[in-house]
Amino acid sequence: MIDGIYILANDVVYDQLVALLNSIEANAGRKIPVCIIPYNEQLDKVKAEIASRDNVTLFEDSDSIAYWDDFATQIWKNYPRAQKTWRGWGFPELYRLPMHRKLCGVDGPFDRFIYFDADTLLMGPVDYVYEKLDAYDWVVNDFQYKSDLKFVFDGSSEQMQQVFNSDNLQSKVFCAGWFATKKNIFSPAIRADFIDKLIAGEAEVMCCLGPDQSLFNYMVLRSGISYYNFAFHDCKQSTGNHWSSQFDVVDNILYDQGRRLTYLHYMSINSSNFTQLCAGEDVNIPYRDVFLHYRYLKSPEERPQSFTRPSQLMLLQKSTRSFIQQRVNNIKLNYRNLKDRINGY
């Protein structure tokens, strides 16, 4: 039985990836192999980092990557409401497509695995998570169920009842940034059935804002595999994990009312903030010193010793570039909408 960790990454999130890898090495409680799933081909820094670590590899199963890209493409390109919504927002027709590559883990070398988004830090041992997979097929530890259901499923109540046949769907949803499951959890037949059902109309229950999260929740709930959420089923012992919460910091470990966190999730904070911070800019990031500790755990001499605020000229240049890019995006959006009207969409 091989336990492992998967991370989806590329060079854009390099600083966050290094911090995460160092936190895993420092806090996992034992040496756990890690495999990086490529978000895209922008991997020069990632490959150099992998070469420096004896327990980290790159996921190189091109057939699996192509399969899951195609799987998500079939679903979302055949979901009319998503296509119309994304056109209206000025998004591409396959919005956030590479995020679905997280599912490559079910084809990979690990029998049991935990998936981490790159914008996380491990704070404590994870053996309890692997052990829970002895009894359940999919395990999470988050409070997504306390958020509005529309961030996962936004179909009508009648549609959701018909698809999921559940009176308490709110309590079963989860965040797709951190989860644990097993190899081959979805058979080829189940995967094909997902595509058929979604294209036939069940996709209407899915939210367009976070496509990978909505699809993963659909797959878990629709397949009927056994599911466990520590934050729901053992709420009194669970901790928060979102950066917006108030945690205590002791020796670069975060605690929630005396309970050690398993992980911290920097969800929704732009990766450029971390890049700028590591370049010496005075960027305000929650638990900044904790992040910097893990980012430079193996190279403390490279850690910025002081931070400077961008000059007014630099801020003006950034603002000008942003304004120009927004104008370009608006022109492209107007052109696409005009073309859609001409074509009768």
Image (cartoon, rainbow, N blue to C red):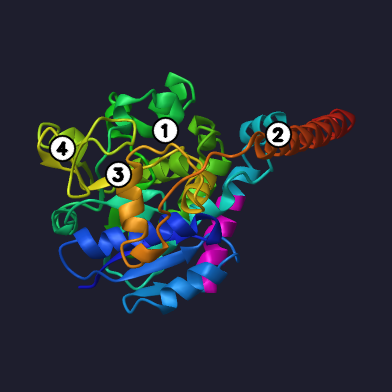
As drawn, 20 above or below 326: below
| Quadrant (top left/top right/bottom left/bottom right) for the N terminus | bottom left
| Quadrant (top left/top right/bottom left/bottom right) for the C terminus | top right
Given the image, on which type of amino acid does mark 1 rest? Val
Q: Quadrant of residue 28?
A: bottom left
Task: In the rendered structure, find residue 163 and report the number of the disc placed on it.
Answer: 1
Is residue 321 left or right of 58 when viewed as pictured?
right
- Give yes or no for contact between labels 2 and 3 (Cβ–Cβ under 8 Å): no
Residue that label 4 marks: 238
Q: Position of residue 202 (x, y in %)?
A: 50, 36
As drawn, 167 above or below 237: above
Between the residue at mark 2 and the residue at mark 3, the CA separation in whole angstroms equals 33 Å
Q: Label 4 neighbourhood size at 10 Å, few (<14), some (14-19), many (20+)?
A: many
Is residue 135 left or right of 226 when viewed as pictured?
left
Upstream in the sequence, badge 4 or badge 2?
4
Residue that label 3 marks: 264
Given the image, on which type of amino acid does mark 3 rest? Leu
Please state the total of marks drawn on the protein image: 4
Is residue 322 left or right of 339 when viewed as pictured?
left
Q: Position of residue 194 (x, y in %)?
A: 47, 48
Between the residue at mark 4 and the residue at mark 2, the CA separation in whole angstroms equals 45 Å
Camera-near label (4 vs 2) is 2
In the image, which residues are magenta? 62-73
Given the image, on which type of amino acid does mark 2 rest? Leu
Upstream in the sequence, badge 3 or badge 1?
1
Residue located 30% across and 29% down the image:
145
Residue located 47% across and 40% down the image:
283
- Give yes or no for contact between labels 4 and 3 (Cβ–Cβ under 8 Å): no
Upstream in the sequence, badge 1 or badge 2?
1
Q: Position of residue 253 (x, y in %)?
A: 20, 48
Q: Is residue 103 visible?
A: no
Going by the picture, which residue comes out furthest to the top?
157
